[in-house]
Image (cartoon, rainbow, N blue to C red):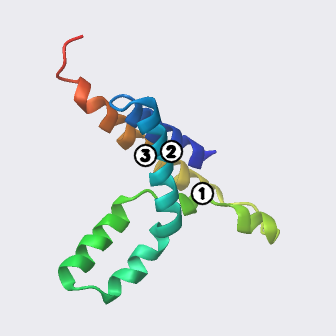
Amino acid sequence: LLNLFVVAAMASGFSYTLTTSANVAITLILYLLINTYGPGVKEASHNLAPFARYLSQGIYYLLPHFEFFDMRQRFVHHWGALPLELILFLTGYALVYAAVFLALGWFPFRSRSL
């Protein structure tokens, strides 16, 4: 649910300035790229030149980590329930990224007159 919350905020933030088809395409591409390559960016950056390493690690820490919300392994292996502290942290994490994406969509409209 938190994963969907962040993706919906991403799509909503992009929808303020993009057409519908561009919004769907960019949101889907970003979600798939972050989900697929996001966890491996940090490991791959160890073999890069220093500037490229710092740049890729900065990108790694700025991207939302959708793998944090993935509970498939817990269900498959019948692990116990998540601790309340972790649920609160993940909820706060999702709220921060949702606020960032919605704020990015709002910025172009703050100086325009309606």
- Asked if disc 1 and disc 2 are in contact, CB closer than 8 Å, the reply is yes
Is 101 left or right of 94, judged from the image as shown?
A: left
Q: Pinpoint residue 58: horizontal percent, then vertical percent.
A: 28, 67
Is 77 left or right of 85, judged from the image as shown?
A: right
* Residue in front for this viewpoint, 66 or 81: 66
Q: Pinpoint residue 60: horizontal percent, then vertical percent.
A: 37, 67
Q: Earlier in the sequence, mark 1 or mark 3?
A: 3
Q: Residue at x 47, y 69 (%)?
A: 37
Kindly identify the amino acid type of the residue bearing the numbered disc 2: Val
Is 80 above or below relative to 2?
A: below
Q: Residue furthest bottom?
A: 47
Kindly identify the amino acid type of the residue bearing the numbered disc 1: Phe
* Residue in front for this viewpoint, 17 or 84: 17
Mark 2 vs mark 3: in front: 3
Which residue position holds label 2?
6
Which residue position holds label 1?
69
Residue 47, quarter of picture = bottom left
Q: Earlier in the sequence, mark 1 or mark 2?
A: 2
Q: Earlier in the sequence, mark 2 or mark 3?
A: 2
- Asked if disc 2 and disc 3 are in contact, CB closer than 8 Å, the reply is no
